Image: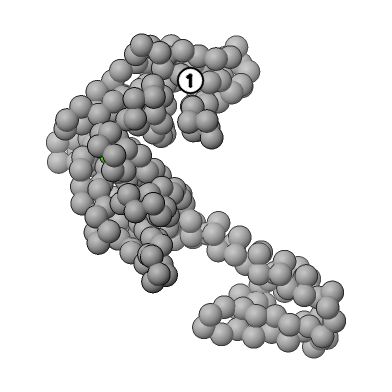
């Protein structure tokens, strides 16, 4: 079935003419042709299949050393094809001399939509943050919420199941904006009248507290961490979109246009 779909998409006449041998087995799809030029084509098929699968099942991915063993873990939110929210959290850890260890956690009831790795409390151990969309006991409306977990190599356990930030928010990420070895939480928040702002939070014992807010923008569509550990945001001002830099100096947000 999968193979036929690909053949249809790529209008592969070779299949009909029987020139191509196709094997589908438990480990995947293997193609072979007598003429060498088709080897390149088969690699293209494999990439196409992989890209389709990734696009269908992978909602969000992040990587970082969760347990301080100098090996990075990959964490992923997987979804069902077509779904808006995720179904499960997957942690892939590389073990010294024993290959990969893969753990999967059912998060179907949390509606996860994003995932980050950051040292939120500055203790040298990284936390796992899952953005969820759900009600809580004290706040029984569906809303995006930032949850924090620790991972001990065997299981995850909750550190802070954040009920809310200062306002409803679209997205968030983590970055050490002030070089104090603690990752701040940076969010895109809805400020009223359709405008949005950037808010920066620091960890305070049993939750986060706001440090600094930007002024409002007509809109903010993206926020991302650069390789230089700085924040860029795509904002709309005077009806035009542009990327700006966000930094934090003496607990005040500075904007680089
Ligand atoms: Ca930590
Ligand atoms: Ca910091």
For ligand 1, the image quadrant comes to top left
The type of colouring in the image is one colour
Residue nearest the observer in this picture, 208 or 165: 208
Image location (x, y in percent) of residue 58: 48, 56
Image location (x, y in percent) of residue 221: 52, 29
Residue at 20% across, 47% down? 158
- Element at label 1: strand
Q: Which residue is mark 1?
A: 246
> Is residue 245 positioned above or below 16 on the image?
above
> Is residue 132 positioned above or below 36 on the image?
above
Image location (x, y in percent) of residue 71: 40, 54
Residue nearest the observer in this picture, 48 or 126: 126
Residue at 73% across, 73% down? 42
Residue nearest the observer in this picture, 54 or 152: 152
On the question of residue 192 being in view, the answer is no
Image location (x, y in percent) of residue 154: 25, 61
Residue nearest the observer in this picture, 242 or 69: 69
Based on the displayed image, in which of its 4 quarters is residue 48 positioned? bottom right
């Amino acid at each position: 079935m999968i193979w036929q779909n690909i053949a249809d998409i790529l209008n592969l006449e070779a299949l009909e003419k029987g020139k191509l041998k196709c094997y589908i087995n438990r480990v995947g799809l293997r193609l072979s042709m007598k003429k060498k030029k088709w080897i390149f084509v088969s690699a293209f098929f494999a990439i196409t299949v992989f890209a389709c699968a990734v696009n269908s099942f992978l909602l969000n991915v992040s990587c970082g050393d969760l347990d301080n063993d100098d090996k990075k873990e990959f964490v992923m939110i997987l979804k069902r094809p077509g779904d808006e929210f995720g179904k499960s959290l997957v942690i892939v850890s590389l073990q010294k001399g024993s290959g990969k260890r893969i753990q999967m956690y059912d998060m179907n009831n949390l509606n996860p939509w994003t995932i980050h790795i950051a040292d939120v409390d500055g203790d040298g151990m990284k936390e796992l943050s899952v953005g969820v969309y759900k009600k809580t006991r004290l706040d029984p409306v569906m809303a995006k919420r930032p949850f924090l977990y620790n991972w001990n190599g065997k299981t995850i356990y909750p550190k802070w199941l954040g009920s809310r930030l200062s306002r409803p928010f679209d997205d968030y990420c983590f970055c050490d904006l002030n070089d104090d070895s603690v990752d701040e939480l940076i969010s895109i928040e809805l400020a009223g009248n359709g405008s949005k702002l950037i808010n920066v939070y620091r960890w305070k014992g049993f939750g986060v507290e706001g440090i600094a807010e930007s002024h409002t923008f007509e809109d903010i569509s993206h926020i991302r961490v650069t390789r230089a550990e700085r924040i860029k945001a795509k904002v709309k001002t005077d009806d035009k979109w542009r990327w700006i830099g966000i930094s934090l100096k003496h607990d005040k947000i500075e904007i680089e246009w």
